[in-house]
Amino acid sequence: MKIFVVLVFLITYIVLMTKKGHPFVILGSAIGLLFLSGAISATQAFSSINYNVLGVFLGTMVLSGLFIFSGVPAYFATKLVDRAKSIGMALLSVCILSGIISSFVENVATVLIVAPIAFEIAKKLKVSPVPFLIGVAVSANLQGCATMIGDSPSIILALSSGMNFMDFFWMKGKPGITFAVELGAVGSFYILYLLFKKYKEPVAKIEEAEVKTWFPTLLLSLMMLTLALSSFIKNKPTYTIAFICLIYAGIGLIWHELKHQESLSLVKDLDWHTFFFLIGIFILVGSLTYRGIIGDIANFITALVKGNKFLAYTAIVWLSVFLSAFIDNIPYTVAMIPVAKLIAGSLGIGPEVLLFGLLIGTSLGGNITPIGASANIVACGLLKKEGYPVKFKDFTKIGLPFTLAAVSAAYIFLWLVWGSN
C-alpha cells in the first residue's frame, strides 16, 4: 500500500508541475484513487485538513481584495516614485514597497497592485519593463514569509506548528524569522540596486492614484493588532486565529455591500483556486502521514545526516531552495513540515531552526525561475501581454543572485540564533 500511495503522490505532483490538465481534476482523481484503494478513509481525509489555515487564508484574501479596491497601495507607490531622485531609485523604491505590501497581502495581489507603476516608469524611460517587473515579483516573494499572514506557506507553517502572529517577530526570547527575512532583504535589495543604478535620469511626473477609502486599511491594521493581542491569551480555542480573520473579513464584506454593492463581484474574484487546491493537498499529504511514509522520509534524512544537526539544517534549507525553484511551494510545505518536526525530534533539538529554514528555502527558492512562484508567473504573463515575453535565462539572471543573497544571509542568521536551541 505504501508504494501505491507514493506513486499516486509522485504522479500527481509531476502532472501538476507540468500543468497537463486542470489541477482540480488531477487532485480529485488522485484523492478518488486513494479512497477507492482504502489508502485513506473519509474520517482521516477530513482530519488531514487544517481548517485554521483555510480560515486565515480566506479572511486575509478578502481583506487583500478590499485593500486593493481602496487604492491605498497604488497611492503610496506613486508617492514614493515622486520623491525619488532618479528612475533607478524610483524602481528600487517600488520593489521595496512591493515587499512591504506583500508582508500583509498575498504575493500575486501585490504584483497586480504594483505592476502598473513599474510599467509607467519603463514607458517614460523608453526601456524594457522586464527587469522592473521581475524585481517587483521577487521582492513580493521575499517578504511574503516575513509575517504569519504574508503568504500561504507562512500561514501553513504557523498554524501547523502552534506559532502565533508574534512568534514570527519574537519567539522564546529570540528574534524570529522576520529578522532573518529583513537581513536577507538587505543583501537582495543591494542586488537590485546594482541592477537599477544605471538608470540615472530624473523621474517624470506620474499621475497620483486616488484613494477611494481608508476603511480596508483600518480593518487590516485592526486584524493584525487583534492577532498580535491573541498571542497572549493562554488556552484559547483551537480556531481562534481563523475566527479573527474571518470576522474582520465579514465586516469588510458587509461594509463593501452597504457602500458599494459589489461584494458578490469581489467574492467571485477571490483566489478560490488556491483555497480548494489547499484542501486537496492537505488530503493528499494526509495519506502519506497515515501510511507512515512521512516518518520513513524523516528517518532516511536523519540517517543521511548521521546525527549532525547543522547538516540536517543545511539539507532542509538548500533542498527546499532547489526544489521550490521548479515545484509549487504549497504542497511541498505541507509535506515537509511533519518531516522537519520528526527529524528535529530524532536529533533531540527544538524544531524551530528546521521549520524556519524550511520556510526560508521554500519561499525564496521560487524566485530563481519564472515558474517557481505564482507571483513570477503572473508578472511574466503581464509582460507577455504588453509584448515583452520573458526568457528563462533573463529571469534567472536576476532571480538567482537575488535568491542566493537573501537565502545566504537568512541561513546564517537563523543558525546563529536558533542552531543551539
Image (cartoon, rainbow, N blue to C red):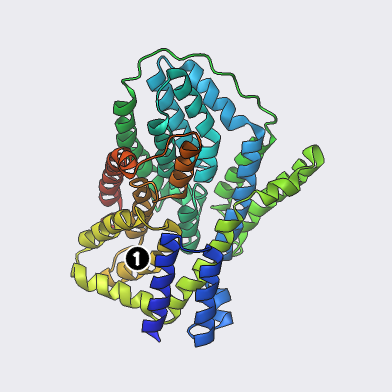
Q: What is the three-letter code of the residue carrying label 1?
A: Ala
Question: Measuring 33% from the left and 31% from the top, which residue is drawn there?
Answer: 192
In the picture, measured across the screen, residue 401 lies left or right of residue 166, that is left
Q: Say which residue label 1 marks.
A: 340
Which one is nearer the viewer's eye here, 13 or 71?
Answer: 13
Residue 5 visible in rendering: yes
The picture places residue 55, in percent across and down from the top left corner, at: 61, 58
Number of other residues with Cα within 10 Å of mark 1, as a class: few under 14, some 14 to 19, many 20 or more: many
How many badges with numbers are in the image? 1
Question: Is 34 rendered above or below residue 219?
Answer: below
Residue 234 in sight in this render = no
* Mark 1 residue element: helix
Q: Nearer the viewer, residue 51 or 131?
A: 131
Tell me residue 5's x, y (percent): 42, 80
In the rendering, at what x and y percent does residue 96 appear?
A: 43, 31
Report x, y in % for residue 157.
Answer: 45, 58
Which residue reaches farthest front? 387
Q: Quadrant of residue 260?
A: top right
Image quarter hosting the N terminus: bottom left
Q: Is residue 217 above or below residue 264?
A: above
Q: Residue at x 35, y 44 (%)?
A: 180
* Placement of the C terminus among the 4 image quadrants: bottom left
Q: Quadrant of residue 133?
A: top left
